Amino acid sequence: MEEKNINSRIDALETKIDLILEYVNNQRLNSSVVEDLTGDLAIIGKDFYDTAVEELDKRQVEIDPEEVTDLLISFARNIKHFKVLMNTLEMAFDLMDEIGPMANEAII
């Protein structure tokens, strides 16, 4: 009886260890995917940066990093206002889509 109890406990522990190993393997795979994505994004970011610098240089555009920082901070502070603005523009375009055919009929 004692041996049967020990065997059942060992089986339960083996099942738990299998679950832990599966979890660790999944985490390793996820980590690998994230590393691949990070590497790809780094390459894309570098290409984007190099292209942007080249195009701005061709057009003799100089950008002050402090001004860009100020612009981004201002944008972040006013995200709510930009959302309201975008919703208003969307409603205006919807209204034009609805009124357009009626205006054409009135003109004809």
Image (spheres, rainbow, N blue to C red):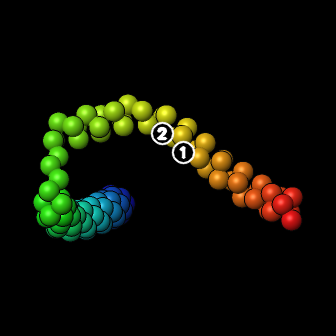
x, y percent for residue 39 = 17, 66
Q: Amino acid at mark 1?
A: Met
Q: Mark 2 packing: few (<14 Cα in 10 Å), some, or many (20+)?
A: few
Q: Mark 1 packing: few (<14 Cα in 10 Å), some, or many (20+)?
A: few
Q: Nearer the viewer, residue 97 or 3?
A: 97
x, y percent for residue 29 = 25, 68
Q: Nearer the viewer, residue 52 or 79?
A: 52
Question: Which residue carries the number 2 mark?
Answer: 82
Residue 10 appears in which quarter of the rendering? bottom left
The residue at 36%/36% (across/down) is 76
x, y percent for residue 60 = 14, 56
> Which quarter of the rendering shows the N terminus?
bottom left
Classify residue 7 as left or right of residue 94.
Answer: left
The residue at 18%/60% (across/down) is 59
Question: Alpha-carbon distance for marks 2 and 1?
Answer: 6 Å
Q: Secondary structure at mark 2?
A: helix
Question: Which residue carries the number 1 mark?
Answer: 86
x, y percent for residue 7 = 32, 64
Q: Amino acid at mark 2?
A: Phe
Q: Nearer the viewer, residue 51 or 20?
A: 51
Rendered image: mark on residue 61: none
Q: Is residue 42 visible?
A: no
Classify residue 108 as left or right of residue 28.
Answer: right
Classify residue 82 as left or right of residue 58.
Answer: right
The residue at 30%/34% (across/down) is 73
Q: Secondary structure at mark 1?
A: helix
Question: Are the residues flagged by discs 2 and 1 in contact, CB closer than 8 Å?
Answer: yes
Q: Nearer the viewer, residue 92 or 77?
A: 92
